[in-house]
Amino acid sequence: MKIAIDVSQIVYGTGVSQYTIELVKNLLRIDKENEYILFAGAFRRKSDILKIFPQTKVFPIPPVLMNIVWNRFHTLPIEKLIGKVDVIHTSDWAEPPSSTFKVTTVHDLAPFLYPSLFPRDMIRNIVDAHKAKLKLVEKESDRILVPATATKKDLVKLGFKESIIRVTPESVSGIFKRPTEVRIEEVKRKHKIFGDYILCVGVDPRKNTERTIKAFEHASTGKELKLVFVGIPKYMTVKESRNIRMIGRGAADEMPASMPEVAGGAAVLVDPYDVNSIAEGIKKALDGPKGLIEKGIARVKDFSWEKTAKMTLNVYNEARK
């Protein structure tokens, strides 16, 4: 089969970027039977795309124009650009018209379910584009990939056919490895982090930072701890204090619908809307870190990008039936 994949999103440093990069890398590694055609729409970022996947066919269509042409007016069939293929896997940004077997990935529905957590300019631009795309996905996609059963249930509630949705759990990049103790100490000195600390990754409004800080202040752990946040500077609205530190860019997790499924018993789960619940979760995680660490290491082994790629390839093969 000829399988076309839209890799336009690989240059933006987001979760979707990593998903696309890791999925394509692993598909190319494990599948020597099918032919893969990578394509992208880009104007200024063409060279960046080609650095990652040199074989990509890059068309001078920037994201804004892509949204207008493919999502809003839904014109210019993808076959006009890449030729005839057997399967097309579209990105999370744009949904081109096509007469072939269409696959897309819906990573989550947060912009639709929790719009108040997104900046107004993001709601107006990005979310509107996703809404337009999602309507086309419902009408035209032959298969929809989701990372968790919770996302599948969300789609079904919105009226999507359950029979075409496939759960393909995602993984993490191989770059995420435990650093050496020397490197850890270097980073701690650089950011003036001394003593024990709790690390929170992500600072945008969706990460529940305000309640997390309140919970930290109420946790009464009996230990001298700091709360350390890591995130993109433009989202940093948290003010530093003696025990709260911000860094530029165990396990307690706030429980959206997919968390029990992903954590698999390897994390302390809490109610993200209840400060007291978060505080109790912090105390539980601190009281039993060794057991959580061991469970976490075991749970991580259940996920790999190779496994994701194999499951995705199985979905592509459904086009043969």
Image: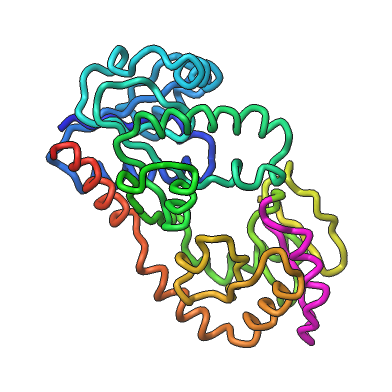
Residue 174 in sight here: no
Residue 238, quarter of the rendered image: bottom right
Quadrant location of the C terminus in the rendered image: top left
Rendered position, 150 above or below 163: below
Residue 30 picture location, percent across and down: 20, 48
Residue 259 falls left or right of residue 220: left
Which span is picked out in magenta?
A: 206-230
Rendered residue at 76%/57% (across/down): 246
Residue 165 picture location, percent across and down: 34, 47
Rendered position, 247 above or below 45: below
Residue 116 picture location, percent across and down: 72, 44
Rendered position, 263 above or below 158: below
Q: Closer to the camera, 287 or 76?
A: 76
Magenta region includes residue 238: no
Magenta region includes residue 211: yes
| Picture mark count | 0
Residue 78 picture location, percent across and down: 33, 18
Residue 62 falls left or right of residue 128: left
Residue 59, quarter of the rendered image: top left
Residue 102, quarter of the rendered image: top left
Quadrant location of the N terminus in the rendered image: top left
